Image: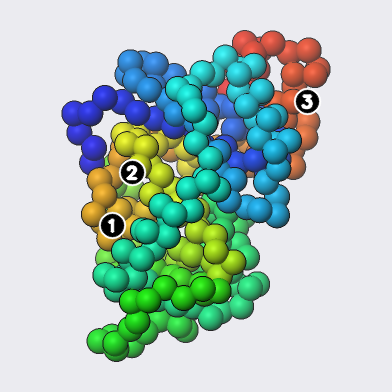
Amino acid sequence: MAQNQPYRGRIAPSPTGLLHLGHARTFCIAYQRAIAANGTLLFRNEDLDPQRSTAAFVAAMVEDLRWLDITWQPPIITQSQRLPLYREALQQLLTAGHIYPCTCSRKDLAQMVAAPHEETDDEPVYSGRCRPVPNEPTSTTLHANTNYRFKVPNDEAIPFHDENLGPQSFTAGTHFGDFLVWRKDDIPSYQLACVVDDANMQITEVVRGADLLKSTARQILLQRALNLSTPHYFHAELMRDANGIRLAKRHDALGLRTLRESGLTPEEVRRKF
């Protein structure tokens, strides 16, 4: 884990819709933890979903977060401008034998680009259909129009301590399988881009929702494979609506923009946390 370094946190919204109350709570926690540690908070625009990311949503999330009195150290870091960094990491993983090409269908891969969420679209455990036979020679040349998966160490427990939820552990091959790191339309997965950016930005603590606990185990494996340090993690409990359903961007009534337009102040919104 990162030790004895000045605190560097980040907020990392995706411009695929308007932010809701759950996002606001998580980002406020990240901001407050950075302030309490006399540290730095960075802003990462996770715009790697080309079908849903829009400039209008980028502008809206920046405006809404500023309205909440959340500040960060400029500039805003935009993932779609950082593809060479991700390709370099991909080549490193391939050269070391940690990934392999996958020819599974588009439907099988559709869920695996955006950040997964435990209750709705977490990656299913991969069947291993494309996994190479042990000791089989593999190419170290990256090929275009190819999906790549990370080969997890089956049956190995991946433990970590969460600063909010305490000790956690997930078993590779049981709780999650070989996961996508690159898609054939030349887009890195959430897992790879997140690991590369957190290391490049020298993040010492990641604050995000508890729906991403399993992703932390995946990312620890990537950090090991890329010889990167592992930051501390703080996973915030998820906010739910009156029916107990986890808040999502479809909850328009609890969108920050809707709450703002209803006349609520930032302080009144924070009291809803």
Estimate the spatial distance between the alpha carbons at disc 3 and disc 1, rounded to whole Å: 42 Å
Q: Which mark is residue 45?
A: none
The image quarter containing residue 206 is: top left
Which residue in the structure is indicated by mark 3? Answer: 258
**The one of 99 and 173 positioned closer to us in this rendering:** 99
Image location of residue 89, percent across then percent down: 36, 58
Estimate the spatial distance between the alpha carbons at disc 2 and disc 1, rounded to whole Å: 10 Å
Residue appearing at x 48%, y 48% in the figure: 82
2 and 1 marks in contact (CB < 8 Å): yes
Q: Residues within 10 Å of mark 1 (few under 14, many from 20)?
A: some
Helix, strand or loop under label 1: loop
Q: Residues within 10 Å of mark 2 (few under 14, many from 20)?
A: some
> Taking 214 as reference, is 166 left or right?
left
Which residue in the structure is indicated by mark 1? Answer: 226
Closer to the chain start, of discs 3 and 2, is 2
Which one is closest to the eye, mark 3 or mark 2? 2
Residue appearing at x 24%, y 37% in the figure: 2
Amino acid beneath label 1: Leu
**The one of 6 and 186 positioned closer to us in this rendering:** 186
> Taking 90 as reference, is 121 left or right?
right
What is the count of numbered marks? 3
Amino acid beneath label 3: Thr
Residue appearing at x 49%, y 65% in the figure: 182
Do we see residue 162 in this rendering?
Answer: no
Image location of residue 178, percent across then percent down: 42, 70
Which residue in the structure is indicated by mark 2? Answer: 199
Residue appearing at x 37%, y 59% in the figure: 88
